[in-house]
């Protein structure tokens, strides 16, 4: 961020975080999909919808959580997101999400692939689909990156290894073991290895497993010698900006995601776990929401100040919601029947709440939305046909959204 943009961003943030405007939301003209990259924030464990994006004031199911106004007159959200309330005109809430599974592993897999798990095949995850359908913009960096993402939730599936996401544990530690003290010596050793393997590669390089092995080495060496490697070092970022995102692991992960899309990494996922609030929901959720509120609201303002919001699709997703009924442990249990997610940027029309649940938050009464529909909408925002058929090596047909329909109202 140059000095002028940083000053503008800090100035806007300081002013708008002070209070919620009462001015009515003015609808934008029709928008077209404009996303080049995706920042995908995944709330691992099942985020409660009544205590976040779909509160029901006065309902017996609401519990202790109160609702607050936003800068869009007809949209209220939980008191747990006071900063996000100031940028709701940039956000599209989807309050009618529905899943076919209430189990964590299956639900997470479904969200990341559009398919239920099968023993016979491993499906590509969304980041792999994006690079398969549209390629990489930055040839030196990975096409997709997972930050704090378990390895079982980031994979290329049956696609080639070049579509495999790079997984990073702690964003504060950057990309570990990525620098070689003597690149000249490394290249000499690689040349010797290449000579030793020449006959083998001549005979067997047509095999996918052999290609994957050589491509892995080529990509690693290319990255080690790239000037773009410094993008992983958060110490390169202004200290004030780091503070604004939040010094916690999730906030720094979101900042790293913004740095990566600045360098044209196509798809960056940041996971934040601990949403499985069977016990003490009204203690745990405010603490977790505060972290998300800080990072997400800052991300939206940061991208906007840099002129990057329209080309970056921000997604917040979770595998299912939590029961409107409060259990005996002051918690909420698994509830795939109805829950909420959101999108912003990338041509998405902000300031809208798509779909509706009833007065208790128990049943969807308007615009039921499947996970496949949600993923089709992500694809559409990127200019991808989510239902284009790609065949696995065994010849089986698959689609990025598995038959999902685009939520067109988000682009109107």
Image (cartoon, grey):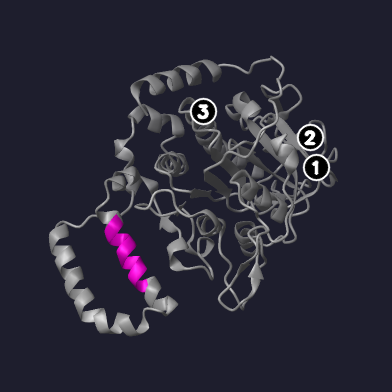
Quarter of the image where one finds residue 96: top right
276 in the magenta segment? no
Q: Is residue 336 left or right of residue 9?
A: right
Point out the tag, 1 or 3, that comes first from the N-terminus.
Answer: 3
Query: Which is nearer the N-term, disc 3 or disc 2?
Result: 2
Q: Which residue is mark 2?
A: 56
Q: Is residue 54 visible?
A: no
Q: Position of residue 100 (x, y in %)?
A: 75, 60
In what element is the residue under mark 1? loop
Contact between labelled residues 1 and 2, with CB atoms less than 8 Å apart: yes
Question: Which is nearer the N-term, disc 2 or disc 1?
Answer: 2
Location of the N terminus by quadrant is: top left
What residue sits 42% from the left and 80% below the top? 207
User: Residue at point 79% right, 31% down?
Assistant: 57
Q: Residue at x 68, y 58 (%)?
A: 387
Neighbour tally class for label 2: few under 14, some 14-19, many 20 plus, Cα within 10 Å: many
Q: What is the CA distance from the residue labelled 1 to the residue labelled 3?
A: 33 Å
Residue 41: x %, y % from top left: 55, 46
Q: Residue at x 39, y 47 (%)?
A: 171
Q: Which residues are magenta?
A: 213-222
The residues tagged by marks 2 and 1 sit, at their Cα atoms, a distance apart of 7 Å
Residues 360 and 233: in front is 233
Q: Which is more toward the observer, 390 or 357?
A: 390
Which quadrant would the C terminus be assigned to in this image? top right
Secondary structure of the residue carrying tag 3 is helix
Q: Which residue is mark 1?
A: 361
Q: Which residue is mark 3?
A: 304
Do callouts 3 and 2 mark residues in contact (Cβ within 8 Å)? no
Q: Image quarter for residue 99?
A: bottom right
- State whether residue 79 is above or below residue 326: above
Secondary structure character of the magenta stretch overall: helix
């Amino acid at each position: 961020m140059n000095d002028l943009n940083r000053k503008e961003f800090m100035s806007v943030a300081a002013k708008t975080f002070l209070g919620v405007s009462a001015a009515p939301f003015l609808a934008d003209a029709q928008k077209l999909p404009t996303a080049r990259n995706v920042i995908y924030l995944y709330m691992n464990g099942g985020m409660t919808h009544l205590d976040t994006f779909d509160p029901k004031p006065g309902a017996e199911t609401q519990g202790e959580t109160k609702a607050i106004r936003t800068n869009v007159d007809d949209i209220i959200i939980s008191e747990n997101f006071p900063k996000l309330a100031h940028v709701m005109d940039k956000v599209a809430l989807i309050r009618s999400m529905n899943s076919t599974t209430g189990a964590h592993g299956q639900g997470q897999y479904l969200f990341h692939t559009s398919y239920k798990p099968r023993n016979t095949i491993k499906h590509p995850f969304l980041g792999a689909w994006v690079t398969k359908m549209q390629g990489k913009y930055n040839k030196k960096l990975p096409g997709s990156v997972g930050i704090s993402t378990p390895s079982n939730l980031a994979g290329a599936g049956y696609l080639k290894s070049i579509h495999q996401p790079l997984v990073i544990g702690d964003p504060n530690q950057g990309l570990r073991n990525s620098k070689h003290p003597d690149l000249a010596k490394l290249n000499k050793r690689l040349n010797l290895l290449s000579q030793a393997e020449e006959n083998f590669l001549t005979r067997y390089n047509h095999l996918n497993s052999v290609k994957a092995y050589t491509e892995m080495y080529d990509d690693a060496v290319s990255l080690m010698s790239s000037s773009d490697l410094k993008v992983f070092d958060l110490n390169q970022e202004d200290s004030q900006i780091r503070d604004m995102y939040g010094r916690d692991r999730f906030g720094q992960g979101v900042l790293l995601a913004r740095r990566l899309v600045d360098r044209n990494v196509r798809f960056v996922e940041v996971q934040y776990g601990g949403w499985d609030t069977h016990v003490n929901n009204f203690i745990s959720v405010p603490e977790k929401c505060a972290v998300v509120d800080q990072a997400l609201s800052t991300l939206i303002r940061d991208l906007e100040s840099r002129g990057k919001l329209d080309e970056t699709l921000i997604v917040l997703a979770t595998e299912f919601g939590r029961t409107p009924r409060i259990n005996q442990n002051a918690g909420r249990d698994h509830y795939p029947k109805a829950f909420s997610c959101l999108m912003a940027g990338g041509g998405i029309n902000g300031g809208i709440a798509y779909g509706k649940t009833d007065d208790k938050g128990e049943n969807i009464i308007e615009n039921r939305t499947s996970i496949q529909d949600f993923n089709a909408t992500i694809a559409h925002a990127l200019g991808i046909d989510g239902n284009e058929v790609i065949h696995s090596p065994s010849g089986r047909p698959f689609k990025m959204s598995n038959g999902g329909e685009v939520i067109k109202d988000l682009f109107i």
